[in-house]
Amino acid sequence: MNPGLSPGGQGSARLGASRLTWFHQGLGRSLVQLTLVVLVLVASPLGAQAAEAEAVFAGGCFWCLEHDLAQVKGVLEAVSGYSGGQLANPSYKQVSAGGTGHQEAVRVRFDDSRVSYATLLRAYWRNVDALDGGGQFCDRGPSYRPVIFTAGDSQASQARTSLQQAALELKRSPAEIKVELKPLSRFWPAEAYHQNYAATNKVSYTYYRWACGRDQRLDQLWGKRARSSRP
């Protein structure tokens, strides 16, 4: 008897076909799942990079401003450096001596899905003396002037809006606000020993900040909003 025509043979054939169908279906599902995993792994780094943005601010001593802006949630990195002048790759000695056109500045790299540029602007204003254009706190001269360096039309527009808001908070006219808004040309990182100075030189940093009167003036000017980024 032909096994394929017997009841047992037909059952075996049906069972074999069923297993083959199940195998193909399972393989199909596995391939779909694997494809999704690969897409997620590939897309995730790109998405993370797309969420990163940068902002550059000058507000007196870059040790202090770097430390203060690094505390804002969503900030990935704060780097001390120089911006605003024409001299390429300036040194601290050159900028401090004057004549370079540069200000001590801080470049902030941030995740704009976690913190907005507008929030960083608020944090900046509450960490500077917005009424002093001749320097900041005990540090005097052009290299310590407060400046918001803007990259593109969006940052420039938001910076102008933030200046108006700062004037309202301080109950001053916009003309009395001495923070300059200036297009960013280039940011030059400062020497390595300036980076993360507040953490690596805690005692001297803490004394300098106190002696310079930075926090005393911020409290006087901004009250409970001093050093904060809340609306």
Image (cartoon, helix red, strand yellow):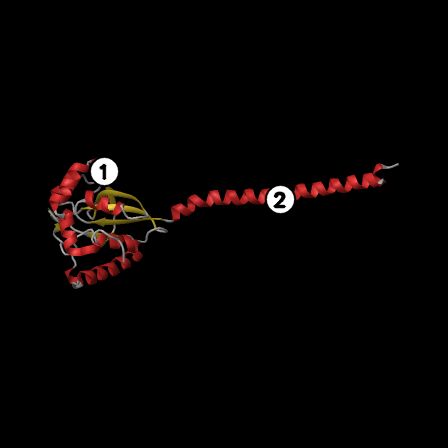
Residue 83 percent location from the top left of the image? 21, 46
Circle 2 residue: 28
Kind of residue at badge 1: Ala
Q: Which mark is residue 54?
A: none
The structure residue drawn at horizontal position 16% and vertical position 53%, both measured from the top left corner, is: 219
First of labels 2, 1 by sequence position? 2
Identify which residue, 188 or 209, lies in the foreground. Answer: 209
User: Few, some or many C-alpha atoms within 10 Å of disc 1 (few <14, some 14-19, many ≥20)?
Assistant: few
Question: Looking at the rendering, which quadrant does residue 81 occupy?
Answer: top left
User: Few, some or many C-alpha atoms within 10 Å of disc 2 (few <14, some 14-19, many ≥20)?
Assistant: few
Circle 1 residue: 199
Residue 2 percent location from the top left of the image? 86, 37
User: In the structure shown, which secondary structural element does the residue marked by tag 1 occupy?
Assistant: helix
Kind of residue at badge 2: Gly
User: In the structure shown, which secondary structural element does the residue marked by tag 2 occupy?
Assistant: helix
Identify which residue, 51 or 219, lies in the foreground. Answer: 219
Q: Is residue 161 left or right of residue 94?
A: right
Query: Could you tell me if residue 181 is visible in this image?
Result: no
